[in-house]
Image (cartoon, coloured by chain):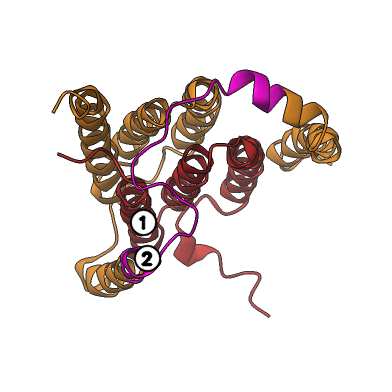
Chain colours: A orange, B red
Amino acid sequence: MDSAAPSLGPQIAFWIFAALTLGTALFAALSHKIVHAAFALMATFFGVAGIYAVLGSDFLAVTQVLVYVGGIMILIVFGVLLTDRVPDEYKVASPRRYLPALLVAALAGAALVGAVAATKWPGVPATMPEPTTTVEGIGRSLLTDYLIPFEFSSILLLVVLVGAARLARGGTR
Amino acid sequence: MSGLTLNHFLVLAALLFAVGVLCVTLRRNAIGVLIGIELMLNAANVNLVAFSRFHGHQHGAVYAIFVIMLAAAEAAVAIAIVLNVFQHSASISTDDYTEMKG
């Protein structure tokens, strides 16, 4: 049992973060006020960052918090606040839409879980292997194997920056 | 007691993706739809990072970084479009975006 004891910590952390992620994601999908959904989404992002930490991906956990909580959340909250005029639209769809939406979501979830359960992943160890430090490997990969996508992403971000500013100005020509 | 397996993370990602689909199909608010899309992108990223860890190399993690970058770009452009359309038609309900019908 001594060999099994160290694996208990990550397991507890996994279940806590999985419950946090799924619970707040459900709240984000179903809450009546879009502001509540936005802040529930922030908790979901923290939960996913915790899952990355359980997976030993320290760099991605930090990136997740920085980019999603620091960037995308601010954008979404700004979008919510700037379009805050028609209270009726804050409500989730009318009840007659619940059934098809639930059906589609349940089918998608069942299909994915079924596919995961039915697939044998070749070359994958049964339990989580020892963590390896990821920052150095990611840095080396980004500047060697993935140099072209890395540079293209910088061009894309510049285009998005200019394009979003141009789009959001709206009426002015 | 066995430790965490790959399927733990894949099932979590599948359920998170299903919640994202639910959010996209249920919301009438364009920003609510965007929230659902972010949930689905996060679910895909959990898969990538899980495979990266279980295969013992960092290619999945690098791919996840590109997905995060694209999600940020997508959110910025989508919210700019929503704000623009809101100025134009004073509504962010997806039911009202019918002007582009062919």
Q: Chain of mark 2?
A: A
Mark 2 element type: helix
Mark 1 element type: helix
Label for residue A112?
2
Residue at x 75% of width, y 24% of height: A140
Q: Is residue A12 above or below residue B8?
A: above
Residue at x 52% of width, y 49% of height: B90
Is the residue marked by circle 1 packed among few (<14), some (14-19), or many (20+) residues within 10 Å?
many
Whether the magenta-drawn stretch holds residue A119 is answered as yes
What amino acid type should be assigned to the residue bearing mark 1? Ala
Which percent across, then down, holds residue A17?
27, 32
- Looking at the rendering, the stretch of residues picked out in magenta corresponds to A111-139
- Find the residue positioned furthest to the front: A2
What amino acid type should be assigned to the residue bearing mark 2? Leu
Question: Image quadrant for the N terminus of chain A?
Answer: top left
For the residue pair A66 and A130, the one nearer the viewer reads as A130
Query: Which image quadrant is residue A63 in?
Result: top right
Whether the magenta-drawn stretch holds residue A34 is answered as no
For the residue pair B48 and A99, the one nearer the viewer reads as B48
Q: Chain of mark 1?
A: B
Label for residue B14?
1
Which percent across, then down, holds residue B73?
67, 39
Label for residue B72?
none
Labels 2 and 1 touching (C-beta < 8 A)? yes
